[in-house]
Image (cartoon, rainbow, N blue to C red):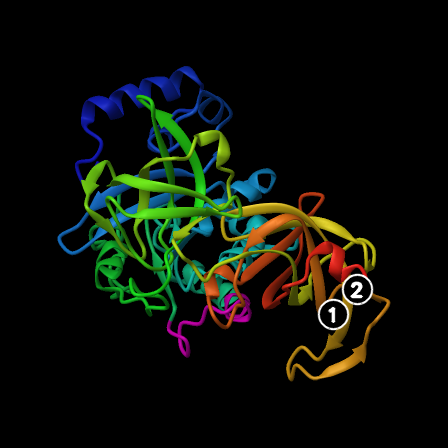
Amino acid sequence: MEKGLVDQREMDKLRREAEVNHREGWEYAYVMDVSEEERTKGITRETGAAYLETEKRRITVLDAPGHKAFVPSMIGGATQADVCVLVISSRTGEFETGFEKGGQTREHAMLVRTCGVRQMICVINKMDEMKWSQERYDEIVGKLKPFLRQNGYDADKAKNLIFMPVAGLTGENLLKQSGVCSWYSGPTMMDFIDELVLPESKTEEDVLCVPLVGAYKDDGKTFIYGKVESGSIAVGEKIQVLPAKQEAVVEGISIESTEFEKCYPGDNVHLRVRGIDEADIHTGYVATSVPTSLRAVEYFQARVVILDVKNIICAGSRFMLHIHAAQEEASFHKLLAKVDKKTGEVTEKEPVCAKAGDVVMARIEVDRPLVMEAHKDFDKMGRFMLRDEGKTIAIGLVTKLYESTRESLAKK
């Protein structure tokens, strides 16, 4: 509302709908939660998107689910993000529930870093209900800091983390400085985002790489969409979609419903294409240039940190692999070595099994070919997580792609 993207008439309509669903005060959530099921049950299930512009930036807001039942959808949102806003409730009991063992705050922080999100803004929300207590704020920040540091977010050294006290309903310290929080002198969230400079990992000169979130048809035209991770593409140019190796011509480029002639790294784009049908596109396919250096593989080597497993991990153990926008069933083909978590030195060659807390070098087999890159060459395309029975059991980095096919590798 503050940015003029939702008018008062629309908010009144959403307020009445929230009251009908016995969810008074949820009208702001309804701006992003658009499905009937999300609104009636009060839980975000899918990642919603909205767009806004400031004087300095064009911003895509991805509202990802927080409930543990919808973590795969949350991962899909995180893979498209450059910045994570981790929202923490300051209410007594609510922070503790989310942060203690089994709470979603811990898993979400770990997953967004594994997805390659390099900057975190941690907002301590509902501070107005806590009467802007600096003691409560310091208590929460004190518990979060060491945990987030373990996951690669550090306010002091890496300087990729900032904390701020906010009140979501009133917008204090989100868009405007709070007049009642005298002890906080930092920027508002929007001011911080406006001035934020992200380290550039890939440029428009690199090979085109757009991990696809999906495809749809509109007025008989086929659209594919995702975030440009590297390279650029212009209207009229030819692309190919891997691993299907199908070629198409880009007939239109839209970003936030605005038509453009060309798109660049960081753009969340919808490409209107000719030569491909929506039925040929699956989530996790990758749009790239013709020719391209990217390729799809059936096997890859990785450094894997085992987090939380019921049983031991061994060759043949199966799981769901999440890498960029892709989700695919996979298995450990072979455990190559156990390595020291700090030094990376091999401590045991070809172990029979691995357990929680171990770090292993492993060869992983995916059921269907996936496009990926070694982590050192392309960070966003080389980070992954493994999930099983609704839990994240491991995180990892791709270290090597195998040329081998199933037939040739089976002989080794």
Which circle marks residue 60 in the picture?
A: none
Q: Residues within 10 Å of mark 2 (few under 14, many from 20)?
A: some
Residue 148 lies in the magenta stretch: yes
Q: Give the range drawn in magenta.
A: 146-159
Q: How far apart are marks 2 and 1 (CA)?
A: 6 Å
Viewer can see residue 404:
yes
Residue labelled with disc 1: 358
Left or right for 328, reference 11:
right
The answer to whether 148 is drawn above or below residue 47 in the figure is below
Q: Residue furthest left?
A: 55
Cβ atoms under marks 2 and 1 closer than 8 Å? yes
Out of 106 and 126, give the one closest to the viewer.
106
Three-letter amino acid code at the position of disc 1? Asp
Res. 169 in view: no
Quadrant for the C terminus in the image = bottom right
The answer to whether 161 is drawn above or below residue 289 in the figure is below
Q: Where is residue 123 in the image (x, y as percent from the top left)?
A: 38, 55
Which of the 4 image quadrants contains residue 62? top left
Residue flagged by tag 2: what amino acid is it? Lys
